[in-house]
Image: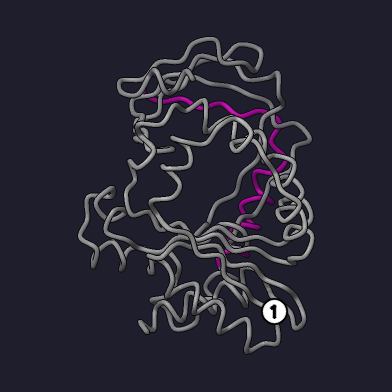
Amino acid sequence: MDPRIIAHGKLIVRHSTQLKKGEVIGIYANTLSSKLAEAIYREALLIGAHPFIRLSLPSIQPFFFKNANKEQLTRISKLDWAEAREVDARVIIISDSNTRALAGIDPRRIAEFSRARKPVRDYLINNKKWCLTIHPTEALAQEAGMSLEDYSAFVYSALFIDQKDPIREWEKLERKQAELIRRIGKAKQVRIIGEDTDLTFSVKERLFVNSEATQNLPSGEIFTAPVETSTEGKIYFDIPTARDGHLVEGVRLVFRNGKVIEAHADRGEDYLNK
């Protein structure tokens, strides 16, 4: 097995989830990321935890969203809830085989599915350890405009796996970000000025979060959220983003009293407004 994959698995078990002996960890992957799932499984087992793997087929998701009836689309089974209560930690591996696989699916069907699963999702987020990570694939490399070799090197560098002690590197970054929070965490208002952008919002009494790869891996950011009714002005996003198989770029939003009152995009505007 690629030693970088082994190191990735160890990082997830020992840093991101801080898994302990006797805990149950669910590993959710597809066939393209089976090696990383195996690496996590092996590391978890060696520390005395109870790992299990849920392996999906890349072709199943688009087939489901295209053909499922309303009952199938919105059903949450007793098994879903039982598994949610049983696990102590979950690892979800992003490893797309086709980043446009859901491009032909009505986004309202995906949204309906997501809304139905919200109770389980909220329970897991609020009560269990979880980690969302990424495994390099040809499709993700193509999306980034890179070869798989170069994209893999990029991902593993972002994970600090190219360093002698990745966990120590993440701990160092956590301390640096804590210092940033100490400096800016007392701010009451934020103003963003840039190309076609002049946006203000209040962060009074908001918590600033130090994201250092415990839940999103890789990570390396500090973030907060605005007071709900405080956002005013306009903002332009010059970086494209893909979601549920749809590419959206050149997004322009106008806010008033915390609500979006205008939403435009150079590409994907219909999807943006759905």
The magenta stretch spans residue 190: yes
Residue in the picture at 52% in, 25% down: 108
- Vertical relation: 99 (above or below) 249: below
Residue 35 in picture, x, y percent from top left: 42, 75
Residue 143 among those drawn in magenta: no
Q: In which quadrant of the rendered image does the N terminus lie?
A: bottom left
Q: Is residue 200 above or below residue 131?
A: above
Q: Which amino acid lies under the numbered mark 1 shown in the image of this protein? A: His
Please state if 71 lies on the left or on the right of 32 as rendered.
right
Q: Position of residue 100 (x, y in %)?
A: 33, 41
Report how many numbered discs are placed on residues in the image. 1
Image check: 55 left or right of 242? right
- Where is residue 210, by image quadrant? bottom right
Q: Residue at x 68, y 26 (%)?
A: 202
Q: Position of residue 110 (x, y in %)?
A: 52, 33
Q: Image quadrant of residue 127?
A: bottom right
Query: Of all residues shown, which one is farthest toward the bottom?
Result: 46
Query: Which residue carries the number 1 mark?
Result: 50
In the figure, 95 relative to 70: above or below?
Answer: below
Q: Is residue 159 left or right of residue 183?
A: left
Q: Find numbered disc 1 in the image and state the secondary structure of the residue it sits on.
A: strand
State the residue in front, 43 or 253: 43
Colour mode of the rendering: one colour
Residue in the image at 61% along x and 55% along y: 211
Q: Which residues are magenta?
A: 173-196
Residue 24: give x, y in percent of width and height.
Answer: 72, 73
Q: Residue at x 52, y 29 (%)?
A: 109
